[in-house]
Image (cartoon, rainbow, N blue to C red):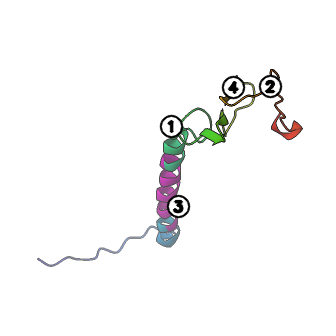
Amino acid sequence: MKTEKIPHTLELDEKIELQSIGWALQRISWVMIAVFIVLASLGLFGNGPLSYQERYKNGSGVEFEKYLRNGSVHEVIFAGDSIKDESLIIKIPQSYF
């Protein structure tokens, strides 16, 4: 089967190269959105397995969320099973707040 090229009189400036670049950028954007949604669902921006942290040393430790959101309530759990005195001093740096 032979194809015939039909000449047209319209002066169209199609710029197919720019369209190809636009399509590639659109695909990259869709992948970035998908990665963002997956990371958000795993807890990178709040509660979840990527944000949950535990630090224990010599029977004492702390459990906390590493990534916090402004205006939300967060819980920090301190645990210790080898307290010798009646008092316990916990030092939290000002930069944490």
Q: In what element is the residue under mark 3?
A: helix
Picture quarter with the N terminus: bottom left
Residue positioned 69% across, 25% down in the render: 74
Q: Which residue is mark 4?
A: 74
Foreground: disc 3 or disc 2? 2
Q: Reply above or below: 7 against 39.
A: below
Local SS, label 4: loop
Q: Nearer the viewer, residue 63 or 97?
A: 63
Q: Residue furthest left?
A: 1
Tell which circle, 2 or 4, labels the residue nearer the N-terminal end.
4
Residue corresponding to mark 1: 41
Q: Does residue 12 appear in this view? A: no
User: Between disc 4 and disc 1, whose residue precedes?
Assistant: 1
Which residues, given as a range, are shown in magenta? 21-34
Give the amino acid type for the residue marked by disc 4 in the picture. Answer: His
Q: Is residue 53 magenta?
A: no
**Residue 9, relative to residue 26: is it above or below?**
below
Q: Nearer the viewer, mark 2 or mark 4?
A: 2
Say few, some or many: other residues with alpha carbon within 10 Å of mark 3 (under 14 / 14 to 19 / 20 or more).
few
Q: Give the CA distance from mark 4 to mark 1.
A: 18 Å
Residue of label 3: 25
Q: Amino acid at mark 1?
A: Ser
Q: In 3D space, how far apart are the residues under numbered discs 2 and 4 (Cα atoms)?
A: 28 Å
Q: Amino acid at mark 3?
A: Leu
Q: What type is the residue that disc 2 sits on?
A: Asp
SS label for mark 2: loop
Residue 52 falls left or right of residue 19: right
